[in-house]
């Protein structure tokens, strides 16, 4: 198998990820690796636009088939195979055999992997089929996941072109929503039992994959369904639903409402989802109405792309927020409010998880919104304009690009390595994603099939401007401190170098020479080497960038010193560059071929080249830059002359490598590695480098290198470089096998013979050991031999006899472990070389081109050549007759005698000693190695399956999965061929001898001595079973290798061309994929069975850990390849667990059973499930702790496979109309014979029997487990385990047997808390399932949770306000109703709502089984039951929990009992609770609260009289409870309130509500320890919990409470102020209800109204205004310190700040915005109060958070106005100092929304502050000014510069004693600060106006501080930011200016 650099990269991706190789081209990650991804598959025939999709697929397939060396199946043959597979799928679906169906899914996956075309209608029918399967209710999640995965594969990832369009397929969305709804909003107590099964995410994934196939006509229905249930409590759940379901067409319907919702909430998850959605839509509708969605569904172009100006500003603002850049001196992350807001929405918690790359979405958004859609902006910095005018126009005439420019400019300084932080990765990632998306769009628009109108496409000037915008930050980030950021920056530079090489390459090469020439900055050197490896293509290809080639040799020479063992990282980077450059180049001297060569007309595609005529003429007197492009002839001449240096370079390279080998550490260790991981990595990278270099050497240079290496080998034998040198020889052999073999073989053979003759490797050992020094020469030559024999099988034939004799000699003479493993390695490599089908030529051009003489004379014109798939001719090695004979001769003459010896040794086990053991291990390893080198030599024929492991009553042979038989290049395939029979006999004999050996070794005494022999047998079994076809791991490695290689030279998946080696690898992966299919689903012969059960399974139970582990790993792999192998060995494994077995055997068996795959299989098949669970439970007889630990682990792991869905999946009988309909469609796609009628009938007949058996087996399992759990001798841990198992068996379609219910009830009194909790949960589950079975009328109702409670009624909501008002009225005694769950009416109202009549008449009719179950439970509840329960619940919990809380399982259990027995035991329970309520022990109070909560919640449907009795007992006790509650128990009682009231109509608890509302809030307490204060805090707590629990129903009284809270905001106590702030947040949250009567009204309002969601009105405006009016008065009345914090101003201020702080961190942050704006001036004045630290801290924090929040553009000018006027009008310098950072943050966050007028105001205020009295304010404003100028005021630089210079010149500093001194100093300082701000506004470039400023500043460098310090600081910053580019930047300064600059840095010299 060919290896190259990509193997290295795949394995050491982390180290090398920075090398441009790792840049992923926006590829969808496949959920499984088994499907080939290929470059540009779908566009192999893209240009022929009139072809059908099917024809295109055929053209693509043809490129695959043409690349293989053997004939493949025709399309018709493969279509027949597809029909066969689909037929099986249909039979499985008709017989509802879902588990067998999933096995056929895998076969369909294999078929898809072959890349054969599938008609659109067939694909659509299959998608429909799998979609319907995903909608089946009550199916095991694992199964649905596999179907969802299949669906995704069929639809294909959209890398280039979708496989199905919306016109090809329509899917119903409603059934998917019904299934999802029950997962997202599970009913009540059911929620607990769903666990974290992830089904909701799988279904959302299905919705997202299929949303474009949902009919667009259903959009109104979708919105009608989703929007009414979107409330502040469900946003985190419903927003993902919206973005996953809404089709990406007809966006005008839903975009307005989406933007309004987005604007109204503060949520990180929502930002993620909507940004992703916006990115998708921008890409989808880049062609506007001309796109695929058509006139109707396409989005119209608006102001920027498909967005209005307002939408665009919001999107960009959210994007700016996503960069997490710490603007305005704030080291904290100012965007955390959204994350905290999501965390605070904990009640709904987000069940939906999805990793979203926000940066990718942002990049998509920018790139796909770009177009020439505005006037072009001039270069304003050089064109002076008057200070008040704004530049008109946009960068390159594109609004989106202009926004991007502002964004990048404003963050530019954060790209610099000196300014790195957590934001660096985000910023560099943005660069990389932007370039990737841009390249992708650019390429798409070059294609004829592109639908984007020409006027909206990207243009060359746009491309140039785009690259210019990103160039500086990318060049800065290239030297970042972390490798990920470097990698991202280099990825961006690589793409830009391919887009605009003339802009990027000179800059990069300049840095490259600089970085390679410095010796002392290794970080720069490695960064440069990595960067060079990314841009090697433009460097070597004259088509991409003509001046590049001549730099290749100088750069290669400069990187040679990088190959240095002392610096592994640098070595890897150097090899990486050499590889990436050399893979495109022939290494040969061209300088000698100068004469007679035509200098034109030989470049491929020359006419495509842009001929730059304008840059060849160089003005006189200008020094020639090495990066300027010359004419083509001059360039070629220079390149040809440079190639004369190749010979020296290659020689130096090999000498350098050999020198490195000499310094390697010694080889050693078990795996015989050289040194540690680092050295191994270095060696791997060097091998890859040598491999590529030798492959591309010209013949002369190859001979030179061959002689150099041969001479070295002849006179050296280095023990530390044996492996490494062998690899070097292998690289030579791979390039030219014949030459290498002829050169090395004779001398190697003679030396090996000589060494063996003198006793090398003659000391017998069987375990790994260090090298014996006297064996060095032998191993050195064996390593060379291994390298020689690894490639070029034709070259071996010439030396056949020598090789066979040598193998015999080595087999018999190498007796130590190192010697015979070396022999084995040689034979394996050789067998691979002889028998393998593999590409034999990996050069960068086809072999016929390489061999042309004119190519040899002018190969530089072809450097960097890229091919299309169809033009590549792959050269393969295919074994011929002679090679097959060679292999058979080795089997006959070497392997057979070895087998004979093994057989003899195995039969004489009595006399085993060290000699015998050594012989056994040697011979067995040799034979095994022969076979492991022959995986594709012999194709397995049909086998007689002796043990099919089928249950004939429930399973059919015809449905057992079978692999697809495809051509895969096997050598011997015809059983009639005598050679086939000969080889087959050898293989069978190998299997038999291994079995014989395994049996023999089991009988030997003193087995420990023979462990090596046993391990050898296990490995031999491994080879026998698994070295066939292709292993999964090898296939995955090849795929990764190919994927890496593919990405190196392409900028987009749309690119048709790639390097030849990539296409060769693609062909290899395709061939190996065919081999891999053969390795799957193999059948077992009787010999296989023997080896599997008698040998391998027994070895898994060995007493020796080493053997056990190895055997188990082989067993699991084998079971994955052979059909029903697991079933076959299970009896052996279960037997090993029975009592009386050795602990080691038990342990081995447990490990086999606990393997995830085996456990899943056992748990899905009912009989095996019973055996498995019972076996685990019976393990308690074994006391060994390690075994008990395993049992605990595996019993917990298997719980995920124990659910009602698992049982239902295997016994499914419900009707499946959706699936049946999809089957009918599918059948129409194929011939009438697609379904085998006979098989179908048999399968359907079996189905009923299968279901019956499954249920019987399940009942048996339950009884068996119950019997074990009920035994008095069972340990409590096992009882708990059994309890969990039994809970898993409770299901909704069958009643729990009475004895099970009895057992659960008994265990609710268990002293063990764990058992008690599980038992309570089990009872709750039993009762809930009993209830829903009674309620549900159909199977669908049962499983989709659509049942209706007989108590419930549905009423329509015609008049929402009247309906809400009705809910506030006391309930009518006769025909009133309760509305428990008010889950609608936030944005809009649903049409109907569920309610419960006050007077219930009906009761639930239970079936007899349920009644028996109920009686069984009742029988346990005796006289003392509740007393005992209360005692147990009152115990102190052993689990230490942070905050005291009620145990939900106890509450639910109590609710269940209350509901089940309708209040029967109420009086008894109340008597028990009475003393607990007031007990001093907090745990007893907790128990009382739990019991009361349960009674109140459970009394929902009690008889009225019982309810009234309960209330009459409870109501008078509320005061008592509250009075005695202490700080440590009050939270129990607030939890009691919360649990009781949540999601139930408060009118059900009218007495409790009346009591809460009657609580008196007396805020006039005097001491924090007085009872008044305590009762106030408790009352406030109660009210806050009450508001939160009843929510919107509190609104009728909320105004009264709000007034009370505002009036008492001046409380003395922090605790009360916090409660008030909390209550105000909640009141605002629940008062906010836009509540449109219908969805249509909402949509209209969102499209037309400026504030449809009413977020700008402010709910407390009156109260806030009165506080604002009073604050100045209270400020004047403040007390002096230390009583200042007692002032009313400070107390009210703190309450307001707390309220603002909490609100701004909540999801509803927008509600407080109007109030925050009103309080803004006061916030600023509070921030200056240094006498109250708390007030100052909170006001600054609120100010920072508020200024960093996103504001709608209509509000930005108001806030800006406030900030500006606060700064201007304030008399306190402190206020100005605090307001300036807020202004910076605000300016940055709202960069695009601030009007030109606003910017001028900011400029004015900054210029004023520059001359402020206070020096700190002046410096702060200078800093701010530089940022503002950089972001948006470049056109005003010249006027500003002139202003500051004239100011500086006009001031002469008088003497210090002069009265004007201070004033003059201040004015001069302001001018100097202004000039410094201008210089700092361009930190990384030298603008034309800059050098002259140095002279002005230098004059003042010696002025008194602060002037001199300001100038010095400015100069040192300038030096720091320009040091990377100083060699170039200094050219902008003349000599005087450079002198001035140094004066600025150091002041005036003493001697000057």
Image (cartoon, rainbow, N blue to C red):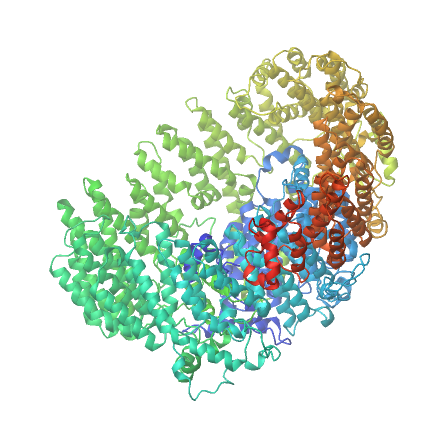
Please count the marks in the image.
0
Q: Nearer the viewer, residue 296 or 479?
A: 479
Against 1653, residue 310 (above or below) is: below
Left or right: 1126, with 710 as reference point: right
Give residue 702's position: percent from left, percent from top.
32, 73
In the rendered image, which quarter is residue 1431 located in?
Answer: top right
Left or right position of 1176 against 494: left
User: Visible in this render: residue 436?
Assistant: no
1049 sits left or right of 1343 in the view: left
**Front in this rendered view, residue 457 or 1155:** 457
Q: Nearer the viewer, residue 898 or 858?
A: 858
Q: Quadrant of residue 1659?
A: top right
Say above or below: 710 vs 233. below
Residue 1697 lies, in percent from the top left, at 75, 31
In this view of the protein, which residue sits in the foreground, 1138 or 233?
A: 233
Q: Residue at x 37, y 71 (%)?
A: 695
Q: Is residue 291 above or below residue 1668?
A: below
- Residue 4, how many percent across, how many down? 40, 63
């Amino acid at each position: 198998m060919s290896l190259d650099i990509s193997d290295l990269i795949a394995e050491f991706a982390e180290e090398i990820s920075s090398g441009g190789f790792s840049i992923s081209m926006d590829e969808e990650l496949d959920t499984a690796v088994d499907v080939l991804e290929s470059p540009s598959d779908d566009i192999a025939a893209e240009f022929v636009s009139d072809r059908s999709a099917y024809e295109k697929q055929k053209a693509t397939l043809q490129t695959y088939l043409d690349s293989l060396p053997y004939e493949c199946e025709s399309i018709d043959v493969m279509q027949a195979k597809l029909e066969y597979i689909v037929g099986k799928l249909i039979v499985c679906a008709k017989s509802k055999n879902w588990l067998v169906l999933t096995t056929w899914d895998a076969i369909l996956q294999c078929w898809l992997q072959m890349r054969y075309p599938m008609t659109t209608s067939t694909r659509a029918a299959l998608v429909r089929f799998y979609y319907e399967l995903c909608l089946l209710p009550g199916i095991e999640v694992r199964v649905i996941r596999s179907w969802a995965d299949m669906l995704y594969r069929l639809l294909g990832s959209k890398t280039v072109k979708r496989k199905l369009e919306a016109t090809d397929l329509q899917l119903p969305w409603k059934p998917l929503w019904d299934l999802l709804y029950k997962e997202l909003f599970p009913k009540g107590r059911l929620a607990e039992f769903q666990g974290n099964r992830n089904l909701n995410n799988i279904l959302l994934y299905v919705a997202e994959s299929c949303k474009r196939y949902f009919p667009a006509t259903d959009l109104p229905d979708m919105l009608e369904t989703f929007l009414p249930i979107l409330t502040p409590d469900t946003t985190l759940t419903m927003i993902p639903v919206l973005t996953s379901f809404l089709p990406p067409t007809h966006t005008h319907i839903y975009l307005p409402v989406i933007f309004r919702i987005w604007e109204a909430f503060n949520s990180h998850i929502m930002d993620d989802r909507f940004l992703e959605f916006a990115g998708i839509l921008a890409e989808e509708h880049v062609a506007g109405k001309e796109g695929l969605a058509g006139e109707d569904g396409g989005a119209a172009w608006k102001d920027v792309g498909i967005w209005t100006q307002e939408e665009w500003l919001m999107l960009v603002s959210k994007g700016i927020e996503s960069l997490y850049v710490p603007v305005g001196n704030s080291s904290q992350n100012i965007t955390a409010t959204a994350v905290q807001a999501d965390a605070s929405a904990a009640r709904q918690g987000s069940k939906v998880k999805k990793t979203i790359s926000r940066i990718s979405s942002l990049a998509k958004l920018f790139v796909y919104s770009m177009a020439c859609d505005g006037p072009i902006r001039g270069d304003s910095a050089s064109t002076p304009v008057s200070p008040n005018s704004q530049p008109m126009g946009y960068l390159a005439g594109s609004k989106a690009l202009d926004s991007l420019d502002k964004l990048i400019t404003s963050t530019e300084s954060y790209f610099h390595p000196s300014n790195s932080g957590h934001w660096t990765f985000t910023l560099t990632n943005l660069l990389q994603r932007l370039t990737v998306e841009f390249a992708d769009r650019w390429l798409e628009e070059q294609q004829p099939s592109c639908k984007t109108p020409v006027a909206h496409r990207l243009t060359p000037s746009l491309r140039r401007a785009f690259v210019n915008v990103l160039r500086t930050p990318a060049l800065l980030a290239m030297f970042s401190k972390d490798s990920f950021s470097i990698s991202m920056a280099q990825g961006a530079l690589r793409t830009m170098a391919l887009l605009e090489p003339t802009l990027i390459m000179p800059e990069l090469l300049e840095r490259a020479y600089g970085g390679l020439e410095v010796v002392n900055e290794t970080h720069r050197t490695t960064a440069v080497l990595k960067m060079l490896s990314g841009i090697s293509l433009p460097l070597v290809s004259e088509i991409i960038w003509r001046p590049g080639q001549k730099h290749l040799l100088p750069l290669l020479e400069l990187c040679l010193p990088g190959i240095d063992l002392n610096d592994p990282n640098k070595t890897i980077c150097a090899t990486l560059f050499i590889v990436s450059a050399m893979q495109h180049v022939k290494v040969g001297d061209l300088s000698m071929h100068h004469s007679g060569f035509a200098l034109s007309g030989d470049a491929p595609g020359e006419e495509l080249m842009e001929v730059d005529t304008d840059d060849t003429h160089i003005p006189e007197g200008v020094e020639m830059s090495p990066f300027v492009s010359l004419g083509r002839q001059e360039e070629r001449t220079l390149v040809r002359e440079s190639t004369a240096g190749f010979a020296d370079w290659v020689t130096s390279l090999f000498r350098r490598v050999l020198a490195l080998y000499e310094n390697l550490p010694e080889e050693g260790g078990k795996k015989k590695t050289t040194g540690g991981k680092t050295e191994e990595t270095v060696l791997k990278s060097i091998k890859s480098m040598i491999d590529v270099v030798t492959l591309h050497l010209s013949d002369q240079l190859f001979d030179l290198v061959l002689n150099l290496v041969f001479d070295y080998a002849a006179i050296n034998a280095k023990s530390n470089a044996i492996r490494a040198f062998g690899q070097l020889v292998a690289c030579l052999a791979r390039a030219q096998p014949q030459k290498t073999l002829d050169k090395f073989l004779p001398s190697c053979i003679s030396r090996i013979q000589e060494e063996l003759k003198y006793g090398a490797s003659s000391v017998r050992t069987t375990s790994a050991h260090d090298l014996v020094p006297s064996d060095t020469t032998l191993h050195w030559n064996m390593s060379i031999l291994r390298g020689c024999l690894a490639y070029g099988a034709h070259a071996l034939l010439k030396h056949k006899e020598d090789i066979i004799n040598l193998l015999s000699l080595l087999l018999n003479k190498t007796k130590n472990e190192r010697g015979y493993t070396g022999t084995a390695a040689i034979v394996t490599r050789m067998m691979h070389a002889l028998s393998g089908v593999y590409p034999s030529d990996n050069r960068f051009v086809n072999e016929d081109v390489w061999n042309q003489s004119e190519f040899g004379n002018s190969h530089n014109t072809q450097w960097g050549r890229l091919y299309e798939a169809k033009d590549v001719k792959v050269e393969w090695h295919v074994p011929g007759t002679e090679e097959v004979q060679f292999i058979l001769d080795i089997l006959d003459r070497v392997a057979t005698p070895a087998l004979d010896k093994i057989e003899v040794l195995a039969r004489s086990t009595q006399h085993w000693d060290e000699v015998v053991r050594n012989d056994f291990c040697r011979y067995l390893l040799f034979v095994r190695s022969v076979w492991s080198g022959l995986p594709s030599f012999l194709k397995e024929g049909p086998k007689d399956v002796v043990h099919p492991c089928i249950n004939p009553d429930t399973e059919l042979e015809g449905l057992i999965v079978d692999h697809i038989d495809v051509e895969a290049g096997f050598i011997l395939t015809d059983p009639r061929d005598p050679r086939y029979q000969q080889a087959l006999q050898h293989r069978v004999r190998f299997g038999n001898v291994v079995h014989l050996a395994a049996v023999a070794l089991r009988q030997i005494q003193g087995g420990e001595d023979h462990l090596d022999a046993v391990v050898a047998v296990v490995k031999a079994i491994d080879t026998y079973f698994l070295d066939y076809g292709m292993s999964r791991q090898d296939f995955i490695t090849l795929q990764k290798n190919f994927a890496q290689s593919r990405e190196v030279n392409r900028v987009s998946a749309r690119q048709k061309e790639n390097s030849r080696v990539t296409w060769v690898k693609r062909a290899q992966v395709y061939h190996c994929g065919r081999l891999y299919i053969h390795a799957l689903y193999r059948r077992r012969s009787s010999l296989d069975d023997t080896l599997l059960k008698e040998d391998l399974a027994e070895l898994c139970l060995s007493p020796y850990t080493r053997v056990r582990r190895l055997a188990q790993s082989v067993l699991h792999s084998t079971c994955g390849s052979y059909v029903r192998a697991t079933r076959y060995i299970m009896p052996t494994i279960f037997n090993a667990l029975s009592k009386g077995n050795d602990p080691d055997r038990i342990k081995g068996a447990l490990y086999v059973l606990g393997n995830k795959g085996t456990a899943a299989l056992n748990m899905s098949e009912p009989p095996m499930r019973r055996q498995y669970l019972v076996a685990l439970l019976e393990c308690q007889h074994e006391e060994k702790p390690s075994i008990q630990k395993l049992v605990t682990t595996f019993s917990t792991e298997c719980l995920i496979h124990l659910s009602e869905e698992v049982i239902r999946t295997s016994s499914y009988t419900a009707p499946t109309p959706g699936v049946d309909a999809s089957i009918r469609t599918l059948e129409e796609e194929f011939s009438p014979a697609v379904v085998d009628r006979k098989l179908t009938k048999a399968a359907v007949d079996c189905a009923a029997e299968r279901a019956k058996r499954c249920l019987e087996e399940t009942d048996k399992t339950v009884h068996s487990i119950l019997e074990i759990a009920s035994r008095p001798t069972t340990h409590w841990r096992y009882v708990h385990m059994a309890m969990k198992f039994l809970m898993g068996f409770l299901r909704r379609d069958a009643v729990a047997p009475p004895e099970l219910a009895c057992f659960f009830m008994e265990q609710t009194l268990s002293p063990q808390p764990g058992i008690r909790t599980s038992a309570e949960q089990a009872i709750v589950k039993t009762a809930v399932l009993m209830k829903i079975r009674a309620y549900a009328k159909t199977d669908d109702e049962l499983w989709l949770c659509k049942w209706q409670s007989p108590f419930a009624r549905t009423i329509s909501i015609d008049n929402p306000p009247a309906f809400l008002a009705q809910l506030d009225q006391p309930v009518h005694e006769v025909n009133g109703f309760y509305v428990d769950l008010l889950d609608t009416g936030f944005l809009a109202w649903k049409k109907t709502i569920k309610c419960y009549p006050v007077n219930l008449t009906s009761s639930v009719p239970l079936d007899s089984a349920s009644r028996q179950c109920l009686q069984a439970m009742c029988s346990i509840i005796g006289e003392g039951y509740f007393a005992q329960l209360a005692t147990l619940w009152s115990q102190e919990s052993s689990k230490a929990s942070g905050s005291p809380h009620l145990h939900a399982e106890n509450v639910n259990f109590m609710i269940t009992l209350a509901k089940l027995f309708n209040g029967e035991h109420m009086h008894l329970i109340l008597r028990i609770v009475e003393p607990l309520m007031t007990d001093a022990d907090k745990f007893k109070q907790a128990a009382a609260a739990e019991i009361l909560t349960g009674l109140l919640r459970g009394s929902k449907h009690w008889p009225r009289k019982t309810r009234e009795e309960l209330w009459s007992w409870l109501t008078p006790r509320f005061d008592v409870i509250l009075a005695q509650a202490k700080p440590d128990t009050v939270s129990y009682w607030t939890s009691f309130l919360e649990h009781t009231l949540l999601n139930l109509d408060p009118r059900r608890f009218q007495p409790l509500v009346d009591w809460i509302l009657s609580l008196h809030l007396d805020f006039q307490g005097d001491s924090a320890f007085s009872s008044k204060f305590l009762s106030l805090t408790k009352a406030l707590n109660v009210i806050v919990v009450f508001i939160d629990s009843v929510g919107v129903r509190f609104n009728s009284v909320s105004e009264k409470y709000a007034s009370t809270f505002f009036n008492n905001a001046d409380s003395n106590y922090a605790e009360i102020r916090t409660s008030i702030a909390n209550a105000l947040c909640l009141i605002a949250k629940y008062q906010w209800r836009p509540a449109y009567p219908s969805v249509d009204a909402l949509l209209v309002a969102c499209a037309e109204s400026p504030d449809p969601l009413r977020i700008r009105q402010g709910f407390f405006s009156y109260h806030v205004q009165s506080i604002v009016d009073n604050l100045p008065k209270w400020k004047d009345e403040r007390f002096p310190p230390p009583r200042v914090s007692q002032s009313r101003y400070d107390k009210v201020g703190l309450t307001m700040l707390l309220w603002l702080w909490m609100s701004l961190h909540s999801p509803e942050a927008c509600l407080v915005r109007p109030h925050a704006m009103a309080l803004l001036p006061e916030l600023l004045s509070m921030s200056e109060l240094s006498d109250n630290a708390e007030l100052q801290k909170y006001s600054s924090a609120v100010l920072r958070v508020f200024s960093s929040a996103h504001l709608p553009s209509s509000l930005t000018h108001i806030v800006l106005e406030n900030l500006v006027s606060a700064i201007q009008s304030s008399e306190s310098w402190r206020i100005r100092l605090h307001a300036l950072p807020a202004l910076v943050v605000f300016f940055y966050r709202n960069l695009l929304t601030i009007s030109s007028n606003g910017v001028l105001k900011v400029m004015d205020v900054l210029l004023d502050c520059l001359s402020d009295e206070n020096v700190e304010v002046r410096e702060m404003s200078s800093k701010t000014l530089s940022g503002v100028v950089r972001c948006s005021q470049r056109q005003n630089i010249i006027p500003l510069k002139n202003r500051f210079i004239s100011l500086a010149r006009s001031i002469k500093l008088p003497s210090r004693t002069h009265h004007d001194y201070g004033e003059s100093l201040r004015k001069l300082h302001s001018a100097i600060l202004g000039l410094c701000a201008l210089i700092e506004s361009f930190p990384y470039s030298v603008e034309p106006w800059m050098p002259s400023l140095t002279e002005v500043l230098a004059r003042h460098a010696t002025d008194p501080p602060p002037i001199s310090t300001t100038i010095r600081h400015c100069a040192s910053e300038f030096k720091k930011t320009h040091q990377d580019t100083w060699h170039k930047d200094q050219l902008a300064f003349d000599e005087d200016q450079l002198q001035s600059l140094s004066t600025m840095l150091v002041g005036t010299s003493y001697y000057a």
